[in-house]
Amino acid sequence: MDETVIVERAGKPEAVLLSVGAYDRLRASREAAKGLDALKRARALRDAIRTRRAGAPVPAPEDVIAEMRGERDDELTRLR
């Protein structure tokens, strides 16, 4: 049974009793909404990066890592 009961105090709604099925559906829809929100934020971040880079292609992760390692090695060499 999927009955919902509203609990009132002084004629004003205070709480809601749901079936477990209704509660599970509510949680699932909330989680789906969070996922969509995260996707929207990721797309907005992607668009901001593209704008900031003015159309220049994003370097491959391997290239970024190699550059960072080179900078680290140079820094360590200077410290010796």
Image (tube, rainbow, N blue to C red):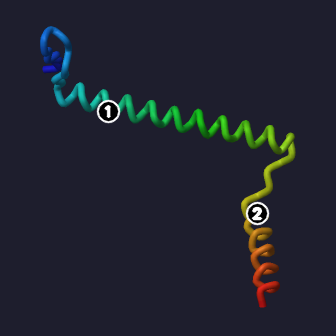
SS class, disc 1: helix
Please, is residue 75 above or below residue 67 in the view?
Answer: below
The residue lying furthest to the front in this view is 10
Residue 39 in percent (x, y) is at: 56, 36
Q: Secondary structure at mark 2?
A: helix
Label 2 Cα crowd, 10 Å radius (few <14 / some 14-19 / many 20+): few
Residue beneath disc 1: 27
- Quarter of the rendering containing residue 74: bottom right
Q: Residue at x 61, y 40 (%)?
A: 42
For the residues marked 1 and 2, what is the alpha-carbon distance in whole angstroms?
40 Å
- The answer to which of 56 and 1 lies nearer the viewer is 56
Closest to the observer: 17 or 58?
Answer: 17
The amino acid type of the residue labelled 1 equals: Arg
User: Furthest-top residue in view?
Assistant: 11
* Residue type, mark 2 in image: Val
* Left or right of 21 on screen, residue 77: right
| Residue 21 in the image, given as x and y percentages of width and height | 21, 28
Q: Which residue is pictured at 34% across the width and 33% down the height?
A: 28
Where is residue 16, by image quadrant? Answer: top left
Residue located beneath label 2 in the image: 64
Q: Is residue 68 left or right of residue 56?
A: left
Number of the label disc, if any, that sits on residue 51: none
Sequence order check, earlier mark of 1 and 2: 1
* Residue at x-position 83% and y-position 44%: 53
